[in-house]
Image (cartoon, helix red, strand yellow):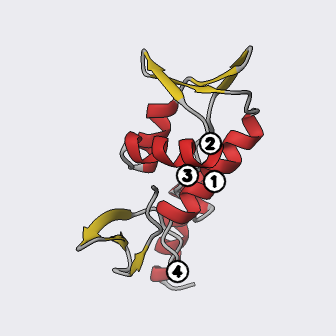
Amino acid sequence: MTDYEKLLNRCMEKIPEDCKDGGRFTMPKADVLIQGQRTMVTNFYDVANTLRRDPKHLLKFFLKELATSYEEKDKKVTFQGRFPGPLMNKKLELYAKNYVLCPNCCKPDTKILKADRVEMLKCEACGAKQAVKKIK
């Protein structure tokens, strides 16, 4: 074994196990509480920060997908209606697929930019640009 291979093996042993899987992005989960006919997401702003998106954009997406209204109080968002946790997390995954993850390299290092009247998803990792559907 060469000196290079020995050094490489020594370096590989020092890498933490959670970094070896290759993925550094973990999809956040919404903490959902159902109270009567209302659904509260207690970590809504934390999820938006993890995704590196404006909470207003994420909220607009949820309102359109769930076809409902909302209330905001103490950093918690309450939606009118009963929406179970798995449904909310499925909608969150759909949002990430359409507005966070790069379609070319699948990395979350993206930003939403506005070019003329078109919103573009620009990847900071690979440089790809793609038009995204505007949330009305």
Q: Along the line of sight, which residue is nearer the eye, 136 or 104?
A: 136
Helix, strand or loop under label 3: loop
Mark 2 or mark 1, earlier in chain = 2
Whole-number angstrom distance, CA of label 2 to CA of label 1:
18 Å
Answer whether residue 13 is visible to the viewer in this image. Answer: no
Contact? badges 1 and 4 (CB < 8 Å): no
Mark 4 or mark 3, earlier in chain = 4
Identity of the amino acid at label 3? Pro
Give residue 136's position: percent from left, percent from top: 45, 55
Q: Residues within 10 Å of mark 2 (few under 14, many from 20)?
A: few
| Residue mark closest to the camera, 2 vs 1 | 2
Identity of the amino acid at label 2? Ala
Whole-number angstrom distance, CA of label 4 to CA of label 2:
58 Å
Q: Quadrant of residue 86?
A: top right
Mark 1 or mark 4, earlier in chain = 4
Q: Residues within 10 Å of mark 1 (few under 14, many from 20)?
A: some
Residue lying furthest bottom in this view?
2
Looking at the image, which residue is at 65% across and 49% down?
91
Looking at the image, which residue is at 52% across and 49% down?
61
Q: In the displayed structure, would residue 87 be above or below residue 83?
A: below
Mark 4 or mark 2, earlier in chain = 4
What residue would you read off at disc 1? 93
What residue would you read off at disc 2? 67
Mark 1 or mark 3, earlier in chain = 3
Whole-number angstrom distance, CA of label 4 to CA of label 3:
19 Å
What residue would you read off at disc 3? 16
Q: Quadrant of residue 36?
A: top right
| Residue mark closest to the camera, 4 vs 2 | 2
Mark 2 or mark 3, earlier in chain = 3
